[in-house]
Image: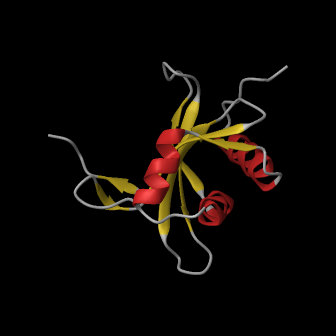
Amino acid sequence: MVAEITDIDETLRRITTYANAQNIRITQHAHQEMADEDITIDEVLEAIASGEILENYPEHRRGACCLISGLTTKEQRPLHIVCTTTSPVVIIITVYEPRPPKWITPAQRRQQI
């Protein structure tokens, strides 16, 4: 039985635990984004481990998920990872490096007009 998680810190702890145990699945879309932006799975795992949840989408139409912002260990490269939050297998939905014009900083989204 998978419990619904609403506490952000607990959600991140769970995602990190599952990711560290290699309980992850990467969607085709995420694989393509990683290839396009030259992002490795190790960098994704590093960013999750160092990350924070910027946005939580518990009622998303495709299932509960969140946006994690973190840094890679060696390059300190900022990455955003959108992944599921309630499954015992973390599904990586997309991965990208946050950039203008959509993002002012890795943690601050530009306001839409």
**Nearest the eye: 111 or 20:** 20
The percent coordinates of residue 53 (x first, y second) are 56, 48
Quarter in which the C terminus is drawn: top left
Asked if residue 113 is positioned above or below residue 70 in the image, the reply reads above
The residue shown at (58%, 55%) is 52
Relative to 45, 98 lies left or right: left
Query: Residue at the spot x=66%, y=35% of the render?
Result: 85
Seen at 66% across and 59% down, the residue is 45
Residue 55, percent across and down?
A: 49, 42
Q: Vertically, is 100 above or below 65?
A: below
Comparing 94 with 4, the one in front is 94
Q: Position of residue 81 (x, y in %)?
A: 53, 50
In the image, 75 versus 14, the foreground residue is: 75
Q: How many marks?
A: 0
Residue 32, percent from left and from top? 46, 49
Q: In the image, what residue occupies the spot 63% across and 60% down? A: 41
Q: Answer with left or right where residue 101 lies relative to residue 105.
A: left
Displayed quadrant of residue 73 = bottom right
For the N terminus, the quadrant is: top right
